[in-house]
């Protein structure tokens, strides 16, 4: 972002340049902005040219969206061998391969920037860059953070903390998929998902596994009155797992009681092997020792929602994992949930 006081910042004019049209990484000033360490969310250490940039960086940090500040300068015009005009977008979001130029509402600046962006697209058509006004922030967030969820139905102020962004979850799920594929080389698998929280995890994980596989589902529910079991199967498997390699997929483990019940029941059916894969593990809360072969993330002891996990059937479709502010639960309890009459199971 350029401040209104300095309409021609010096960094955009090169005294002596090169005819090389490639973007110039500022590797002479800073370490090269390589993306090996994608979580460069340390805006406290970055000297921003404009307060709006600091605010934008804070927002990106909150949503755990990786960013780099002005990592690249793109030559736009030349006079012979000399670069006479450059463009240095304010931010780069490596996970989304997107450059962002922030702009104030001042019309003269917007016009100039639009001109620059047009030129940028002519000279560097392969680079994605957007011009963002303050009002556009949330539109961008909807794209890179909120997915399909309306930002107005869960404003930032209602979120205590985002634990994992959609990109972080996707990366970890691919890693798990690769690990499982390698471990099950030469074998076919039956993936058994525990409904309903496992919905997205199973959908994503199964596509990251390169072994032949079948998918089946189990649902557990509280015991009927008078029954001695802690829980029961509200939906049992369709597939006979005897002699098959079974991988039980669970969204989250807290006490381990649910998994323990399910594992003991499935083991009785004599599968060739039975392993457990859990995306989120509140390890500190285990009451029972459940042998978990694959763990996505060990998380703190907070109630979490998103990426399939619900609070009274709500918030499953948030693409990130987050802790909500206590007020939100109170409010939902009174309003939104009243009509849903949902059970609080899985
Ligand atoms: P456990 O039997 O105590 O391990 O609880 C496991 C089940 O409780 C999971 O299958 C989830 O459906 C639910 N659960 C546990 N913690 C959370 C949470 O933080 N958010 C949403 N659901 C949870
Ligand atoms: Mg700038």
Image (cartoon, rainbow, N blue to C red):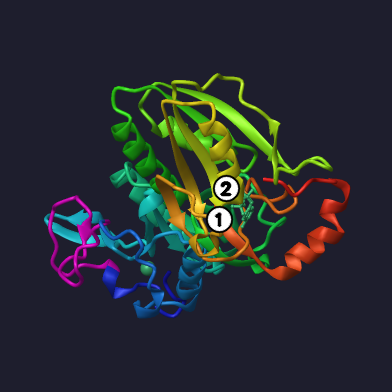
Quadrant of the image occupied by residue 91: bottom left
Specify whether residue 146 is in view.
Answer: yes
Q: Are marks 2 and 1 in contact (CB under 8 Å)?
A: yes
Seen at 61% across and 46% down, the residue is 258
Residue 305, image quadrant? bottom right
Q: Is residue 254 magenta?
A: no
Q: Which residue is mark 2?
A: 307
Please name the residue shown 14% across and 52% down the image. Answer: 20
* Residue at figure coordinates x 63%, y 61% from the top left: 303
- Is residue 136 rendered to the left or right of residue 119? right
Q: In the image, is residue 331 above or below residue 44? A: above
Q: Is residue 338 left or right of residue 266?
A: right
SS at mark 1 in the image: strand
Screen quadrant of the N terminus: bottom left
Of the image marks 2 and 1, the number of the one nearer the N terminus: 2
Residue indicated by mark 1? 321
* Residue 113, percent from left and from top: 43, 60
Point out the stretch of residues depicted in magenta: 12-35
Quick check: which quadrant has ligand 2?
bottom left
Task: Examine the rendering and report whether any part of residue 112 can be seen.
Answer: no
- Say above or below: 5 vs 12: below
For label 2, count other residues whose C-alpha is less than 10 Å away and answer few (under 14), some (14-19) or many (20+).
many
Front residue of this view, candidates 175 and 268: 268
* 321 or 238, nearer to the observer: 238
**Toward the viewer: 297 or 183?**
183
């Amino acid at each position: 972002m350029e401040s209104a006081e300095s309409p021609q910042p010096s960094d955009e004019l090169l005294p002596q340049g090169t005819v090389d049209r490639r973007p110039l990484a500022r590797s002479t000033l800073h370490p090269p902005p390589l993306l090996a360490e994608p979580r460069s969310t340390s805006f406290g250490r970055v000297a921003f040219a404009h307060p709006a940039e600091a605010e934008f960086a804070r927002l990106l940090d909150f949503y755990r969206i990786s960013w780099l500040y002005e990592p690249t300068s793109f030559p736009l015009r030349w006079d012979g061998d000399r670069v006479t005009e450059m463009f240095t977008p304010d931010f780069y979001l490596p996970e989304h391969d997107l450059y962002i130029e922030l702009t104030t509402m001042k019309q003269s600046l917007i016009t100039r920037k639009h001109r620059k962006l047009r030129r940028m697209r002519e000279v560097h058509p392969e680079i994605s860059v957007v011009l963002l006004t303050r009002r556009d922030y949330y539109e961008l967030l909807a794209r890179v953070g909120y997915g399909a969820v309306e930002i107005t139905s869960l404003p930032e102020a209602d979120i205590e903390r985002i634990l994992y962004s959609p990109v972080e979850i996707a990366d970890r799920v691919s890693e798990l998929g690769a690990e499982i594929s390698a471990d099950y080389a030469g074998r076919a698998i039956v993936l058994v998902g525990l409904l309903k929280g496992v919905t997205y995890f199973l959908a994503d994980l199964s596509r990251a596994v390169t072994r032949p596989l079948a998918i089946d589902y189990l649902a557990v529910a509280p015991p009927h009155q008078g029954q001695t079991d802690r829980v029961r199967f509200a939906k049992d498997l369709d597939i006979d797992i005897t002699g098959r390699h079974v991988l039980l997929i669970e969204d989250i483990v807290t006490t381990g009681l649910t998994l323990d019940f399910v594992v003991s029941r499935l083991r009785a059916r004599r599968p060739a092997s039975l392993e457990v894969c859990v995306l989120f593990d509140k390890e500190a809360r285990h009451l029972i020792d459940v042998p978990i072969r694959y763990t996505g993330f060990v998380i703190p002891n907070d109630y979490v929602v998103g990426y399939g996990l619900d609070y009274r059937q709500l918030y499953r479709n948030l693409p990130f994992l987050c802790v909500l502010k206590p007020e939100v639960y109170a409010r939902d309890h009174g309003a939104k949930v009243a009509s849903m009459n949902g059970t609080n199971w899985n």
